Amino acid sequence: MNTNIDINHELNRLLGFAIAHSLILPNDLIWAANNLIGMLGLHSFQREESGKEEAEALRRMSSPEPILERLLDWAAGEGLIEDTSTDRDLLDTKLMGLLTPRPSLVTSTFQSLRSISPQKATDWFYELGISSNYIRAARTARNICWKSATEFGELDVTINLSKPEKDPRDIARARTAPSSGYPQCLLCRENEGFFGHHGHPARQNLRLIPIRFDSKERESLTPAQLLEGDWYLQYSPYSYYNEHCIVLGREHVPMRISRATFENLLGFVNQFPHYFLGSNADLPIVGGSILSHDHYQGGRYVFAMDRAPVEKEYALVPNVKAGRVKWPMSALRLTSSDPEALIDLSCRVLDAWRGWSEPSQDVLAESGGEPHNTITPIARRRGLDYELDLVLRNNRTSEEHPLGIFHPHAEVHHIKKENIGLIEVQGLAILPPRLKGALEEMAEAWGRGEDNLSARPGLAAHDTWYRGLRQRHAGLAQEAVPGMLRDEVGHVFAQVLRDSGVYKRTPEGLAAFDRFIESLR
């Protein structure tokens, strides 16, 4: 037995947390305790009466992670698990799965709250995700986040430190883990409650809410029918912004932007007007990381793109406002109180764009039978109006830009090389963990007066950028250097978005954008 950790006390704390956050009720305590000790190979449990101060402290804790860390340390010390990130995640998810309410209870509670207020329902469901530790809030709190002022407003920048690095032992075991193809992917309905292994994360504490996008259809359903859906709402375990949610399809079918996409996005924001919902594009390079399973992402956050103004209006149809957004990527904003009119016009834009070529701007609709044009759509409410931002995308490659003509170009790869998906399109950069150390080292090199990083391991990729900064910010006080570097990262991200824009913000590029829009008349 590990004498440094009182396992009985830590189990009492975990149970106290579960009661304080309504995961279980007080009369569930013995039942829950017996499940926990059975999983940990213990033979007894002694109930401890918590004092008023300790009970209040547990209530104030939003996440059980501090308690779970103690339990995991004990389990590793006892040899129940290897002390690796995967083994620890498998066990803490298993433990919290025993304390998370059953799916049917979660759904019925959500629907009951939703009848009062959609916001009350999502508030409760989000808090459940945090208290059950499905949403790894303590980890996402480690991310380094800031805003950078640019000509397009304040862009969000995040260095992602939330996902633990894989231990070599985990990598080796993942290679030999059985591959059953169940669940087929991380977004499949069958992940709810899945036990997990070294090749697939545990999901015992995942809960899904059935969603039907058609409000009229939903009103005609019985309570039992509402427990099933064609789509399911969940939250991202590693949130990049407030209430980062995922709406996933019941069937494992590929992403496809179509009329149904626009209908679903607007149907969702009609039911949950305090959330936005968008879809990644449905082609490689310009799409998200998972193209094999149809899904959307949304949440409760105002991005820089939301605040970006319309700089030119177009008269396309009488009851829909249309305009070009002042944004580094090519975005058409459609606004109307009539969702059907919005959907009809969006379909016209999508169909026209899929067949549109403009060689002078490197835009070809297809080559060798391979389609290149698609759209990243984002839906939100503006008071009583519905709004769709349609971002034009093209996934062509060339010898000069083998990763994509409308993709971050080589000169910005030292900051961002990955695909530009739905989240980045709206103005939130998700950057790799390596940048944390690199920015710290660059600030130190600046203080020593170093002008050249080409011989520095890990920093050579930043050398050209760094030397340019040394010239532009000559004489900058050392205490201001870290903030300056962060701001400059934000400016690089703005360039990443410009690279990814189909029509550049030049007179020629904007005129080409206008020509495409005029073709819709």
Image (cartoon, rainbow, N blue to C red):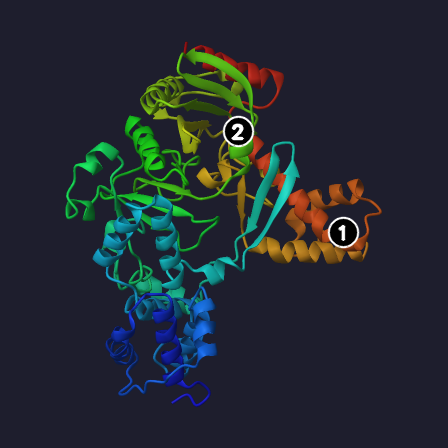
Quadrant (top left/top right/bottom left/bottom right) for the C terminus: top left
User: In this image, 502 relative to 294: left or right?
Assistant: right
Quadrant (top left/top right/bottom left/bottom right) for the N terminus: bottom left
**Which badge, 2 or 1, is on the more N-terminal residue?**
2
Q: Nearer the viewer, residue 37 or 215?
A: 215
Residue at figure coordinates x 17%, y 47% from the top left = 223
Query: What amino acid type should be assigned to the residue bearing mark 2?
Result: Met
Q: Nearer the viewer, residue 396 or 294?
A: 294
Residue 329 tag number: 2
Label 2 and label 1: CA atoms lie apart by 31 Å
Query: What amino acid type should be assigned to the residue bearing mark 1?
Result: Ala
User: Residue placed farthest to the right in the image?
Assistant: 475
Could you classify mark 2 by the number of other residues whose Cα lies within 10 Å: few (under 14), some (14-19), or many (20 or more)?
Answer: many
Residue 205 x, y percent position in the rendering: 31, 62
Asked whether residue 456 appears in the rendered view, the answer is: no
User: In this image, 132 relative to 359: left or right?
Assistant: left
Residue at figure coordinates x 48%, y 16% from the top left = 358
Residue at figure coordinates x 39%, y 37% from the top left = 273
Residue 155 tag number: none
Look at the picture and state if 345 lies above or below 276. Answer: above
Asked whether residue 5 appears in the rendered view, the answer is: yes
SS under mark 1: helix
* Quarter of the rendering containing residue 29: bottom left
Could you classify mark 1 by the number of other residues whose Cα lies within 10 Å: few (under 14), some (14-19), or many (20 or more)?
Answer: few
Query: How many numbered discs?
Result: 2
Residue 480 tag number: 1
Residue 154 x, y percent position in the rendering: 61, 39
Q: Nearer the viewer, residue 227 or 65?
A: 227
Look at the picture and state if 76 lies above or below 215. Answer: below
